[in-house]
Image (spheres, grey):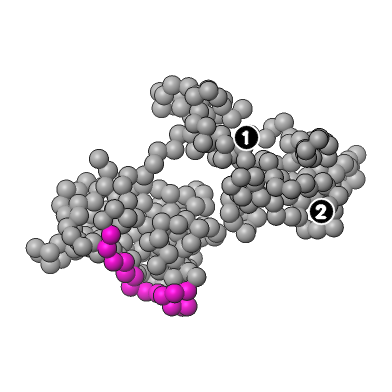
């Protein structure tokens, strides 16, 4: 099923189909390790709990399991016990999880316990296709050239807080910059030299899509005219997933030392959050 979905997607772009022997082993390995959990977790070990955090083998990817009873002959909770197995997508909010059910439980083997997933589960929790066709973003100029970050407004906890502005520049999607009802504001980066960037990336944060930026402009400081040049202007943008990195390209060959991202509006509401922003250069 996963390969079929992948090849359906590839066919829309007139690309050649993929097979198990041609898919990158690193993708298969990272996804497969979500299904093999550390420790032994029989169903009766979580009967009196509101679910249990579990971690994938090797990489420690956070998963979640809980028990549920099916409806039988019209009786709610009158059927067999099943297990909900969820990819948390590294979020504490269940609305961001992707969950599948089991068809049978507690199959004992010599080295563990197997819970069999429902036949309609698609391998990878909706990530298989996106990871196989994933194209890495262009060169991150913050890392390769360096410079100084700045933000016109700071989170209430100050510059060293858990959700301070510095986290939007750190390249770690699991950290974020959060502001409560900031109105219009900007984040910017000053390079030590003139740099000609022609793309940038934004990465959505871990929760509440309502806080995602949806309208913004990108500017570069023109040292000759001593004015801001408009490089890109976008509105009604949407991040479909949490921790989603999007690349935005624009035409530019001029070097600027300072680039500024002006946030004008959030998706729904007044609060703002963003995991990462980078300026990039495509070849």
Residue 283: image x %, image y %?
25, 40
**152 w.r.t. 246: above or below:** below
Q: Local crowd at mark 2 within 10 Å, few (<14), some, or many (≥20)?
A: some
SS assignment for the magenta stretch, majority:
loop
Q: In this view, does 219 lie to the left or right of 105?
A: left
Residue 155: image x %, image y %?
44, 74
Q: What stretch is highlighted in magenta?
A: 146-161
Looking at the image, is mark 2 or mark 1 nearer the viewer? Answer: 2
Residue marked by disc 2: 46
Residue marked by disc 1: 123
Give the Cα distance between marks 2 and 1.
25 Å
169 or 248, nearer to the observer: 169
66 or 30, nearer to the observer: 30
* Label 1 residue SS: loop
Labels 2 and 1: the sequence-earlier one: 2
Q: Is residue 223 left or right of residue 22?
A: left
Please say whether residue 1 is visible from this viewpoint: yes
Magenta run includes residue 156: yes
Q: Quadrant of the N terminus?
A: top right
Image point 27% across, 63% down: which residue?
147
Image point 36% across, 64% down: which residue?
264
Q: How many marks?
A: 2
Magenta run includes residue 30: no
Image point 9% across, 63% down: which residue?
224
């Amino acid at each position: 099923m996963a390969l079929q979905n992948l090849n359906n997607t590839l066919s829309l772009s007139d690309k050649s189909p993929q097979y198990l022997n041609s898919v990158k082993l690193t993708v298969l390995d990272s996804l497969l390790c979500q299904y093999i959990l550390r420790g032994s977790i029989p169903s009766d070990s979580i009967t009196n709990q509101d679910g249990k955090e579990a971690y994938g083998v090797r990489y420690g990817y956070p998963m979640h399991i809980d028990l549920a009873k099916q409806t039988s002959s019209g009786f709610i909770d009158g059927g067999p016990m099943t297990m909900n197995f969820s990819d948390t997508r590294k979020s504490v909010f269940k609305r961001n999880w992707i969950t599948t059910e089991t068809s049978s439980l507690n199959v004992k083997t010599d080295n563990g316990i197997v819970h069999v997933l429902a036949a309609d589960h698609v391998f990878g929790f909706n990530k298989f296709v996106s990871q196989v066709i994933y194209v890495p973003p262009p060169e991150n100029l913050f890392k390769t050239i360096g410079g100084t970050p700045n933000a016109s407004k700071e989170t209430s906890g100050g510059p060293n807080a858990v959700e301070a502005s510095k986290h939007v520049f750190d390249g770690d999607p699991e950290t974020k910059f959060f502001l409560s009802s900031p109105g219009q504001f900007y984040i910017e980066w000053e390079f030590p030299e003139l740099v000609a960037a022609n793309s940038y990336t934004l990465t959505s944060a871990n929760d509440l899509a309502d806080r995602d930026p949806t309208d913004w402009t990108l500017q570069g400081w023109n040292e000759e005219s001593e004015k801001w040049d408009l490089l890109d202007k976008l509105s009604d943008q949407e991040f479909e997933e949490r921790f989603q990195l999007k690349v935005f390209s624009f035409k530019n060959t001029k070097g600027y030392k300072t680039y500024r991202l002006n946030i004008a509006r959030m998706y729904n509401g007044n609060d703002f959050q963003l995991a990462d922003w980078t300026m990039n250069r495509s070849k």
